[in-house]
Amino acid sequence: MGLIPEAFARSTVAREGAAGAAWLAELPGIIEDLLARWHCTVDGQVAYGQVGVVVPVRDAALKVSFPHPGNDHEPDAFEAWRGRGAVKLYERDDAHYAMLLERAHPSTLLESDQDVVTIAGVLHRRLTMPAPDGLPRLSEQADGWAEKLRKDAAELDHPLPAAVVDAALAVVDDLGRDQPEILIHGDFHPRNILSADREPWLAVDPKGYVGDPAYDAAIFLRTRAYHLFAAGGLLTDDLLRQLRAELEQFAEVSGIDPEHINRWLQLIAVQSSFWGRRNGFGRARSGPRLEQIISLIDELAVQWM
């Protein structure tokens, strides 16, 4: 079955090694079985993200992801939302990390010429709800965050002042260890917001964490910083002014404390700076482009203090 895009197969093997190759060998059969079980007919070209493929079928979409703990609770989040601000979940097969979902359009909020920040803030407010039982707490990652920050700060060659790293560690202590019992998306950014028919915009690809909604807002704004920089080539001062205005705008329409968003951005910027130095990013693994992105993140980490 020639459904698996070659680029997706290459990136999966590069990331997961032998386990990825073994899963790819089984994937066509998994898809065939699911299509038959859920009485689906392929209706379009297969799309893919970093960890899974999406097979368009009549009136729905079949998503199958590489088995990874980070994908465990995606269907739980969809079940909790029941289509409120997110695509609907029709069927799930947890053993194969597979879901039959409401079909949306491939166009994302990133490509929109509308008021992206307001759209995202309103959508996020709709997604925010008391967390159901059984979901992982974002606070459980706090000890790991602190340990890794200290390790990276000591081992990596970086220009971040000690006060900036200390400010990030303070966020872990002040906000990271005790978070509200709220369902959050966990990876809320413009590419994970798709145009749709039932509603203009719907969220996809949640992690399904319990935690502080301001964390989602910070993830969104960190991603916006890169997109604004890449699209417009804004000078750092101009970029910072626009990001601060967008932070206030997102906070107002979503109902989130802007100071909490600001502080989560402090932590996420430092984490991203260190991550980029160790691993690169999907948009740049090495070379001048990576250096440019890391320099931007370093500046944001300093400025968000």
Image: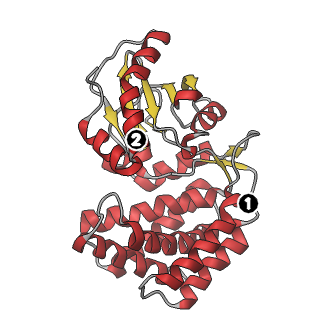
Q: Report the front residue among 132 and 25.
A: 25
Circle 1 — which element? loop
Where residue 145 appears, x then y in whole percent?
A: 61, 68
Label 1 packing within 10 angstroms: few (<14), some (14-19), many (20+):
some
Amino acid type, residue under disc 2 in the picture? Gly
* First of labels 2, 1 by sequence position: 2
Q: Report the front residue among 57 and 111.
A: 57
Residue position marked by numbered label 2 in the rendering:
20
Alpha carbons under labels 2 and 1: distance apart: 35 Å
Residue position marked by numbered label 1 in the rendering:
179
Amino acid type, residue under disc 1 in the picture? Gln
Residue 261 placement, left or right of 212: left
Q: Which residue is drawn at the image coordinates 42% and 85% (left, top)?
A: 158
75 relative to 139, above or below: above
197 relative to 35, above or below: below
302 relative to 9, above or below: below
Where residue 23 appears, x then y in whole percent?
A: 42, 34
Circle 2 — which element? helix
Q: Which residue is drawn at the image coordinates 46% and 36% (left, top)?
A: 65
